[in-house]
Image (tube, coloured by chain):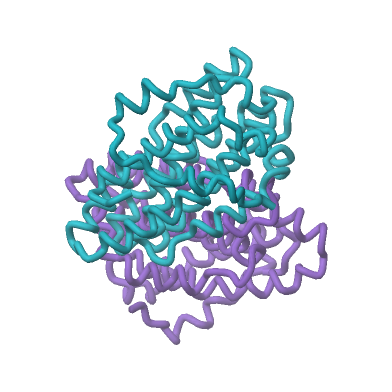
Chain colours: A purple, B cyan
């Protein structure tokens, strides 16, 4: 099981006043030393996409209307396409997708349980917020993979994941019922800790993530998180 | 809500001794008189594919291994492609997919609740058995749509739905645990009644389905059901 690193609590603070340009220029870090071995990376990344699909599917199943189901099913389909791209890379690297992903399923399933929302709105926030954070991290980390795989994986992760559709769905829900805001803001903040833990887990040696090399990356990821929350009008 | 037609109970008997050739030659019926108006057909058909996707997603979520999740996610993706093909037809016919599907969601959601299995194995049987029956029916009924739409819809429904993958998954589960057979056979038989009701619902006027025109079609569909159950080694 993933353990919570008590020393990392302080880092969970969100740098609210940082602009996008500022955070990007000050935190560009070479993740290559931290990137795990190819199949390890692909197994964890593909399984994370699979649980992102499961979360979206849960949002399809609990959607309040046929129209909402229809829209979210598009995002689910896009996420699954990305997942299939990653499993194709596992096969290309000589691995069996089920076996390779299966090594990491217990920890990632536990994460998935923790981020499952209590209702449709929370589930949508989870879909947007955790997948956004994880995808940012996986994209950055992919730069450290062997050259050919790196380019292909970066391309797979750059493909549309349907995040804009999910964000539009949440915004419409908040517009229709502004009282949702504070609850969803709280839920969004709660997700950050678990999401940071699972990104550490993607690293070959999560303990190495406590060192100074990883901190700027998390600042960058949290800045991305803050932008996503801001775009919904929610306080990160 | 859909009502159970008490007069139809007798027709639920499965014609076990009928061969494929025999049933097809004796039951070829023109469904054109029964086919509903285009948008009605498309709304019901698209929403039925959407709940087929939801059932497959539930099977992904509850699958016992990463490998099984991976395999079933392929079937889910294929089913969603078919659903998207049908919603594209709704748009082409001037309808809004959410609105058009939404007219029929209450009845179809109630069906979906009734066929949800109690565990992964039952869910898989539901995915295979109800979708197989419904797809056979929708394909037959599509012949009665306006010419251009008919050809396109028949092609959409002829595309792979992943049924062979689901069947392989169930067969492997039964091989690994033969004691499952009788429970799954019972579950498969239980599904037939609800599935027949929902196919009647697809018709513009379900009451018309009680007349003699529909009976040969159901014999044909039940023969298809029996073949699917037989292929799994289960008594229909």
The image quarter containing residue A29 is bottom left
Q: Position of residue B233 (x, y in %)?
A: 23, 49
Q: Position of residue A39 (x, y in %)?
A: 24, 54
Which residue, as the protein is rendered here, is positioned at the far top?
B147
Nearest the camera: B180 or B57?
A: B180
- Residue at 36 percent of width and 77 percent of height: A2
Q: Is residue B102 visible?
A: yes
- Residue at 36 percent of width and 59 percent of height: B186
- Residue at 55 percent of width and 76 percent of height: A12
The image quarter containing residue B90 is top right
Q: Is residue A32 visible?
A: no
Task: Identify the image quadrant of the N terminus of chain A.
Answer: bottom left
Which residue, as the protein is rendered here, is positioned at the far bottom?
A6
B186 relative to B236, above or below? below
A49 relative to B202, above or below? below
Task: Identify the image quadrant of the C terminus of chain A.
Answer: bottom right
The image quarter containing residue B173 is bottom left
A134 relative to B158, above or below? below
A40 relative to B49, above or below? below
- Residue at 53 percent of width and 62 percent of height: A130
Q: Position of residue B32 (x, y in %)?
A: 59, 20
Q: Is residue B167 left or right of residue A163?
A: left
Q: Is residue A227 left or right of residue B23?
A: right
Q: Position of residue A149 (x, y in %)?
A: 29, 42
Instruction: Report the label total.
Output: 0
């Amino acid at each position: 099981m993933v353990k919570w690193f008590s020393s990392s609590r302080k880092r969970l603070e969100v740098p609210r006043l940082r602009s996008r340009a500022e955070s990007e220029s000050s935190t560009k870090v070479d993740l290559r030393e931290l990137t795990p071995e190819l199949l390890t990376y692909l197994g964890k990344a593909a399984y994370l996409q699979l649980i992102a699909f499961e979360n979206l599917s849960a949002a399809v199943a609990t959607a309040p209307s046929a129209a909402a189901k229809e829209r979210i099913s598009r995002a689910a389909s896009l996420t699954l396409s990305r997942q299939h791209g990653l499993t194709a890379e596992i096969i290309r690297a000589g691995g069996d997708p089920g076996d390779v992903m299966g090594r990491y399923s217990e920890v990632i399933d536990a994460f998935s349980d923790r981020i499952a929302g209590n209702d449709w709105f929370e589930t949508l926030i989870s879909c947007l917020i955790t997948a956004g954070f994880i995808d940012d991290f996986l994209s950055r980390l992919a730069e450290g993979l062997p050259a050919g795989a790196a380019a292909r994986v970066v391309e797979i992760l750059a493909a549309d994941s349907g995040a804009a559709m999910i964000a539009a769905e949440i915004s419409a829900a908040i517009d229709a019922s502004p009282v949702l805001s504070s609850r969803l803001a709280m839920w969004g903040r709660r997700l950050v800790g678990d999401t940071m833990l699972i990104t550490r887990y993607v690293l070959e040696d999560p303990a190495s993530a406590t060192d100074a090399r990883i901190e700027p990356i998390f600042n960058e990821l949290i800045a991305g998180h803050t932008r996503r929350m801001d775009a919904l009008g929610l306080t990160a």
